[in-house]
Image (cartoon, rainbow, N blue to C red):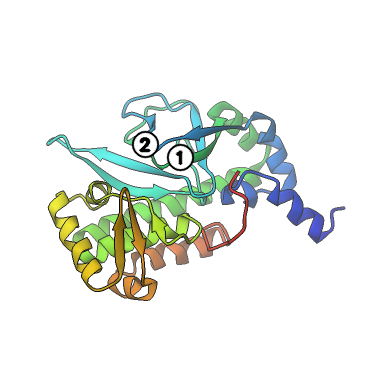
Amino acid sequence: MLTRREAAAEVNDRPYNNLLRRLDRADFGLIEPHLTTIQTDPDDLLYDPGAHVETVYFPCGASLASYLVANEDGRDVETILVGREGAVGGIVSQGRLPAYTRIIVKFGGPLVRLPIGRLDAAKTRSPRLSNIFARYADCMLAQMFQSTACNAIHSIEQRTAKWIISAMERADGSDAVPLTHEQLATLLGVGRSYTSRVIQTFKTEGIVETRRGAILVRDRDALQKRACLCNEAVKHHFEEVLRGVYPTEEPGRSVS
């Protein structure tokens, strides 16, 4: 039987994805031989609407994937971000189904791939593994509910602060968030000019600075005060349903 230290070392040898690290040794062993790692760049396409979903992708480290819903005016509006706390593509479905949204890479880096057929076979063999993925799907649904409510009742300033904080949490607490004004506008579902005005206000107040292709946070406390509480609600639900999976700041951890 493994000691606590040996068990921790074994988990840390896995890909830096909290959902994969949440699995016990036997359950992880069911899928480990079928995992492959790819390196991605920002805006890499994982799925288009209508595409057959054949692969589950697990973002690792500071990598981020994003769900985008196409609208009749040609704009894509982002609904949620998914980082190392989860996965995208066929989380609970049985068999191959068409994708409803576009899924892209928001922050580039390593993603671990798993064929859906292999995941379905593992779920059949282990109700415990199936339960963990069902619980994660519940957490993802909670994010979508919260995002819908947030868009309806909170100001652009509150939502801008929320998205920057959400990205920071998934980037291992880095103060530099690789978000452009255009990307923030897509997250918010507004024109770029609205986002630019909010960022300019934050800059004037000494909360952020801007760099080419990135936002540098100078005052986290002030940014947190500007944000709505939607992130906190989502984190609380994650802790209730899948304790320890939502990203926390963990300096010095491997992101492979």
Residue 144 screen position, x and y as percent: 34, 52
Q: At numbered mark 1, what does the secondary structure look like: helix, strand or loop? A: loop
Tell me the quarter of the picture where residue 117 sits. Answer: top right
Q: Is residue 195 above or below residue 77?
A: below
Label ID, residue 34: none
Residues under labels 1 and 2: Cα distance? 8 Å
Residue 11 shows up from this direction:
yes
Q: Residue lying farthest front?
A: 212
- Judged left or right of residue 249, residue 28 is right
According to the picture, the residue beneath numbered tag 1 turns out to be 88
What kind of residue is marked 2? Ile
**Residue occupying the point 26% across, 62% down:** 159
Quadrant containing the C terminus is: top right
**221 or 128: nearer the viewer:** 221
What kind of residue is marked 1? Val
Residue 19 screen position, x and y as percent: 57, 49
